[in-house]
Every structure is written in C-alpha cells, then in structure tokens.
Image: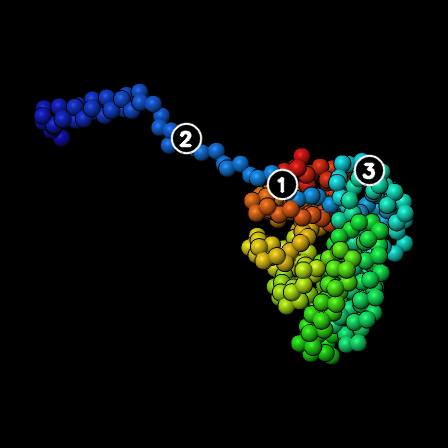
Amino acid sequence: MNTSSSSRITRRGFLTQAAALSLTAAALPQSRTSEAAPPPRLPAPQYTLSVNLELMFPGDMPFDQRLQIVVDAGAKAYSFWGHEGKPLDKMRAIQDKSGIACASIIGPTKTGWGAGLTKTGEEKAFLDDFADSIKVAKRLGAENLITFVGVTQPDIPWQTQHDQIVTGLKAAGDLAGAAGVYATLEPLNGVENAQMAIITSARAYEIAKEVNHERVKVDFDLYHRQLGEGNLLDTLKDGIAKGYVRFVEVGDVPGRFEPGTGEVNYPRIFQVLREIGYAGYIGMEHRTTTTPKEAFDKVKALAGLA
C-alpha cells in the first residue's frame, strides 16, 4: 500500500505534538482536587461498654469472680440476668472498691418468660416480680431492668394481649419512675424465641409509643435484630431518633460470639452510633471465641474506645 509524503508528515507531526503535550502535562503540578480527601473525623464515642457476666464465663464460676475478671480487664460497667442466687453483697463490694457500674439486670425474672402480661389476670404477679427486681437494681445502682412481657397466648385474641401489655407496662413504668429506674423492653427473635409476644423491633416500638411513659424504653439487641429481621442501621437510628431505644446490646451472627466474628458490620454500627451521639450503654451479651478479656479488648477497639 502506497502512502504519500504529506500523509507521512501529518502522522509524524501528530506524534511529535502528542509527545510534547505529554511532557508538558507531566511537568505541571498535580491538582489538589485530584488528591483523595481524608475521611471525616468521627466524634469521640459517648457510649460505655457493659460486659455481661453470663455467656462468656464457665457456668459454675461464681459471679463475684466473674465480676472481678471484668474489673481487671478495665471495664467500666457490667450486666447480668436474674438476681436469684447471686452473691449480691460481694458484687456490691467489688463495685464500691473498683468504681465499676451495674448497667442492667433482668426485670421480671419469674413471669417475663411465662404468663407475663399476656395472660389475663396475671398483671399483679408480673408487677410484684418487677418490684422485687427494682429492689436489687437500687441495691446495685442499675438503671435498666431488661423486661420481657410473656409468651403469646394462643387462646386469647392478640388485641386483648396487646392491651394488657400496654396497661401493665404503664404500671411498671410508674414503679420504675418512683425508683429512678427504667423498664427496658427487649424484643427477642422469631427464629429462637417464636413463642414470645414481642419478637420484632416494630412491635416493641409500637408498644413503647402507645405506652408513652418516660420510664418505659426499648433494648435494641443487635444479635436478635440481625437473626430475626435485619435492616439494622435504619431500625436502630429510627428507634434512637424517636426516643424509644435506651439500651443497645451486641453479639454477632451466627453463633452469638463477640462482634467481628460473624456477618454483622460492627465497624459501621459503631460508626453510626458515634455519628448520632448515642450516649447510653452498649451491653456485650455474647459468647466468646477466646477469653472475656480478649473479647472485651476486641470490642473496645471496634467501638473506638481502645
């Protein structure tokens, strides 16, 4: 194929010009706008981790020993479930010596997983049970009484059960208010606890809204919420923004081990809690793949508290 002289000159000129432009561009200073902007600095965490004394420890270990391990790990708060059989005097003494706070205990320990407020005629037993736990909460300085309202009653219309729950929680709120504590309603999940009356955040929020009591709030347990429904961030932010959520708990899925071992994006969860200024407790209610101390250190790092 013949190529004319003028054509060859045109191509040669094009290549010369392109090379010159490349050299010129290389000589220019890099634009500031092309540099990646650093991520915005997160606000300092306002929340406090509370290590739960139940699942991370051997079942036969006395609770005062568990509490001392938590203190030695550097925790500022702890939680546990029912108060029956616990060495409360020894635990209070450890609190007084170390300064660690008790963040939460279970509210109605005998009735909350049974008749609760769902079975007609059981409200007094529920409130008496709740009042007993208030005494322990006051003794230990715990403000949050984690509250379950009973199993679904198949022979009672749901609306009747709903109304009884609302009425009973208003009364529980009055008891809590007189003592300076909170009835903190915890929805569980439909995978493991389908028999319970409250197993979704939507139902818990609905009831909290209807009860409309400053001493009745919601515990948002991320383990239960992920296992039962997902959509964690939107639901959590909504509950905090509307004033329903007072207490948050963590645990990963599957297995309910410490955050960072499963599918939940805990770095993002803690980032959002920092961004919105959540200033309550975050309960570490989970098992561990290592030791309580190592689990605490791991969650501290994820939470920006290390």
Q: Which residue is mark 1?
A: 45
Whichever of labels 1 and 3 marks the residue nearer the N terminus, that label is 1
Residue 230 occupies which quadrant of the picture?
A: bottom right
Q: Can residue 146 be seen at all in this image of the molecule?
A: no
Q: Which residue is mark 3?
A: 98
Mark 2 nearby-residue class (10 Å; few <14, some 14–19, many ≥20): few
Give the residue at x 57% y 47%: 276
Give the residue at x 69% y 77%: 160
Mark 3 nearby-residue class (10 Å; few <14, some 14–19, many ≥20): some
- Point out residue 52 in the picture as x, y percentages from the top left corner: 77, 48
For this view, does 259 lie left or right of residue 54?
left
Marks 3,2: beta carbons within 8 A? no
The C terminus appears in which quarter of the rendering?
Answer: top right
* Secondary-structure class at tag 2: loop
Q: Which residue is mark 2?
A: 35
Label 2 sits on what residue type? Glu
Relative to 208, residue 236 above or below: above
Of residues 226 and 40, the one drawn nearer to the viewer in this rendering: 40
* Secondary-structure class at tag 1: loop
Which mark, residue 122?
none
The N terminus appears in which quarter of the rendering?
Answer: top left
Label 1 sits on what residue type? Pro
- Point out residue 168 in the picture as x, y percentages from the top left corner: 74, 69
Mark 1 nearby-residue class (10 Å; few <14, some 14–19, many ≥20): some
